[in-house]
Image (cartoon, rainbow, N blue to C red):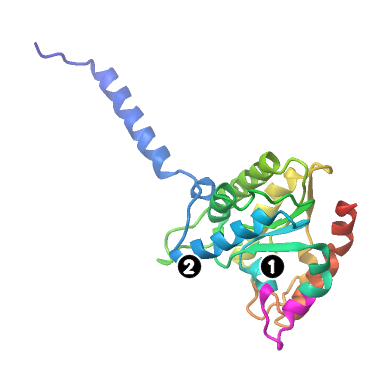
């Protein structure tokens, strides 16, 4: 016996299917933990070993901007700045160039917080969630999605490291001028993640204006590619967080 569904019911079921497909297509990749290539995994494994030692009081987490503290190039002089300001604090740097929120979330969920007991976590992530994929057509994430990725990381840190304070840095400005599309996306991300500040466990700090001129323009003398700081930019960063970091370590 053939059963025929009423027309309105068929439409309703079809609508449910379309809704499910639409929701799947709109899934937020920024909160979906993902690993990257083999070389990236090897670096992650190195961080896991550092974490297991459990002797770091400060933990820096992020992407290439954080990763850049390792730069030994004497012409840029970045590593000496790290050695002066942060090495004495027993700081560890778990930044990897190119990481988005989903990549950092995967790393934290897969061993980088096992054994380590930092007093303070310095977190900045999200700039690589802006803009477009390699096809220059597909958006990576919306600012709201990227902010959700940052929120997921903060929540995971609070769960795994309940005694640690989180110094949540606003994503640094990018692009030469204030109307740069990337700059505008970053500003929207920062506006959203600023709400994570509770003044106790999570302290939000926006030092972006320190990299800009009075007219909002970014100088190549601070960020030559209008994204990554040079030695002068890293010195600005170090000086800007020195006092807040010391306070959190008390």
Residue at point 68%, 47% (across, down): 192
Give the residue pinned by disc 2: 39
Mark 2 residue crowding within 10 angstroms, few (<14) / some (14–19) / many (20+): few
- The residue stretch that appears in magenta: 70-81
- Front residue of 213/8: it is 213
**Residue 94 image point, x, y percent:** 64, 61
- Front residue of 32/120: it is 120
Residue at point 78%, 52% (across, down): 120
- Front residue of 224/212: it is 224
| Residue farthest top in this picture | 1
Give the residue pinned by disc 1: 178
As helix, strand or loop, the secondary structure at mark 1 comes to loop
Residue at point 71%, 62% (across, down): 92
- Mark 2 vs mark 1, CA separation in Å: 36 Å
Q: Is residue 80 magenta?
A: yes
Q: Which one is in front in this view, the residue at disc 2 or the one at disc 1?
A: 2
Question: Residue 62, relative to residue 79: is it above or below?
Answer: above
Q: Is residue 130 visible?
A: no
Mark 1 residue crowding within 10 angstroms, few (<14) / some (14–19) / many (20+): some
Q: Quadrant of the N terminus?
A: top left
| Residue farthest left in this picture | 1
Question: Residue 214, relative to residue 194: is it above or below?
Answer: below
**Residue 38 image point, x, y percent:** 44, 64
**Residue 218 image point, x, y percent:** 72, 75
Residue at point 68%, 56% (across, down): 53
């Amino acid at each position: 016996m053939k059963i025929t569904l009423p027309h309105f019911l068929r439409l309703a079921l079809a609508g449910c299917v379309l809704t499910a497909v639409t929701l799947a297509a709109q899934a937020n990749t920024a909160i979906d933990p993902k690993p990257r290539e083999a070389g990236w995994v090897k670096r992650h494994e190195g961080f896991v070993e550092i974490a297991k030692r459990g002797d770091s009081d400060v933990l820096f987490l992020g992407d290439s901007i954080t990763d850049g503290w390792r730069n030994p190039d004497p012409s840029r002089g970045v590593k000496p700045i790290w050695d002066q300001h942060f090495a004495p604090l027993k700081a560890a740097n778990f930044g990897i160039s190119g990481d988005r929120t989903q990549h950092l979330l995967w790393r934290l969920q897969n061993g980088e917080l096992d054994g380590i007991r930092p007093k303070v976590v310095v977190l900045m992530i999200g700039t690589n969630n802006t803009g477009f994929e390699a096809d220059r057509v597909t958006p990576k994430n919306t600012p709201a999605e990227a902010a959700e990725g940052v929120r997921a990381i903060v929540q995971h840190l609070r769960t795994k490291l309940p005694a640690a304070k989180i110094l949540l840095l606003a994503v640094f400005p990018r692009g030469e001028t204030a109307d740069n599309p990337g700059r505008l996306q970053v500003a929207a991300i920062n506006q959203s993640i600023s709400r994570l500040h509770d003044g106790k466990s999570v302290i939000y700090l926006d030092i972006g204006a320190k990299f800009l001129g009075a007219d909002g323009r970014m100088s190549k003398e601070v960020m030559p590619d209008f994204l990554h700081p040079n030695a002068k930019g890293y010195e600005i960063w170090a000086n800007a967080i020195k006092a807040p970091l010391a306070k959190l370590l008390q």
